[in-house]
Image (cartoon, helix red, strand yellow):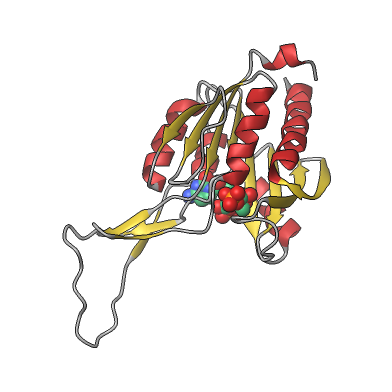
């Protein structure tokens, strides 16, 4: 795809984990480092796209030319994402968004309850990528990720259909040498009538291949 074409394309990417507060000093989160999402942002910006990166708490430098919005919780990521999505041509959800948050966040540090167990009630967070894909006006071409530890392709296909995405990048997160927090990853891209496997390679290299495929599918539909 010609570089010139990307110059007018706006891409929003979510990256990293979210943190769901339990009390002022504790939270629930996951092992996402943000590396995959930041690599996608770098690849898209290098091709001339106007990139907005909505990032959870990570220890990474912002890629050159990328506009970055920092958030902490899934609710904050949802709000930033919905505001950006309607102004985007392409939306890529690479963040590992917490499916649940604590129902009632304690205002003060929770004290140990003698010998008894502690129960936390969790409630569901909004599904960001499904909400973007469900937009009836200014809906961007919507690409999700599927992080699975088993039945990777089947579960990813289910998510592609259930969340009404245009494309999903399935990755196996049961392996420690790829996926969460590694410098490498391998994905299978799935869309309505096709798929492509991309072998294990450095995330920066893989991100280029993923962006190329997204642009090819996006262009064929626009
Ligand atoms: O950050 P790294 O260390 O580089 O690791 C990269 C990665 C493994 C985190 C990344 O490649 C990846 O798989 N990201 C998606 C992680 C995830 O949450 O997958 P999921 O299968 O639970 O979610 C499916 C899709 O729904 C994802 O696009 C996710 O962003 C989205 N989602 C999930 C829950 C929610 N409440 N809102 C969402 O938008």
Asked if one can make out residue 171 in the rendered structure from this viewpoint, the answer is yes
In the picture, measured across the screen, residue 185 lies left or right of residue 88, that is right
Residue 28 occupies quadrant: bottom left
In the image: residue 120, left or right of residue 59: left
Residue 142 is at least partly visible in this image:
no
Residue 64 horizontal/vertical position (percent): 57, 25
Q: Is 157 or 58 nearer to us in this picture?
A: 58
Q: In the rendered view, tell whether residue 138 sits above or below residue 71.
A: above
Query: Vertical placement of 207 versus 86: above or below?
Result: below
The image shows a total of numbered marks equal to 0
Q: Residue 184 placed where, x, y %? A: 70, 51
Position of the C terminus, as image quadrant, is top right
Which residue does the image show at 51% across and 20% down from the upper left? 87
Instruction: Name the residue at 60% across, 32% down.
Output: 41
Which quarter of the figure is the N terminus placed in?
top right
Closer to the camera in the image, 90 or 176: 176
Image vertical order of residue 188 relative to residue 9, above or below: below
Q: Which residue is painted at 21% across and 60% down in the image?
A: 106
Residue at the (37%, 57%) spot, across then down: 101
> Residue 183 in the image: x percent, y percent?
66, 51
- Classify residue 20 by image quadrant: bottom left
């Amino acid at each position: 795809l010609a570089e010139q074409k990307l110059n007018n394309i706006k891409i929003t990417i979510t990256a990293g984990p979210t943190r769901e507060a339990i009390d002022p000093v504790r939270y629930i989160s996951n092992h996402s480092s943000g590396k995959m999402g930041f690599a996608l942002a770098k690849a898209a910006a290098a091709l001339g796209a106007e990139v907005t990166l909505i990032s959870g708490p990570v220890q990474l430098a912002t890629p050159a030319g990328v506009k970055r919005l920092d958030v902490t919780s899934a609710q904050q990521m949802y709000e930033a994402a919905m505001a950006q999505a309607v102004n985007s041509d392409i939306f890529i959800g690479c963040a590992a968004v917490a499916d649940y948050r604590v129902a009632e966040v304690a205002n003060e540090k929770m004290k140990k309850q003698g010998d008894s167990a502690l129960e936390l009630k969790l409630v569901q967070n909004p599904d960001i990528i499904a909400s973007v894909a469900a937009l009836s006006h200014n809906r961007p071409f919507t690409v999700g990720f599927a992080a699975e530890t088993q039945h990777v392709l089947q579960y990813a296909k289910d998510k592609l259909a259930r969340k009404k995405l245009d494309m999903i990048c399935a990755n196996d997160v049961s392996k420690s040498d790829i996926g969460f927090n590694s410098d490498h990853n391998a994905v299978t891209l799935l869309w309505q009538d096709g798929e492509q496997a991309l072998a294990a390679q450095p995330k920066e290299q893989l991100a280029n291949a993923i962006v190329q495929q997204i642009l090819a599918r996006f262009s064929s539909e626009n």
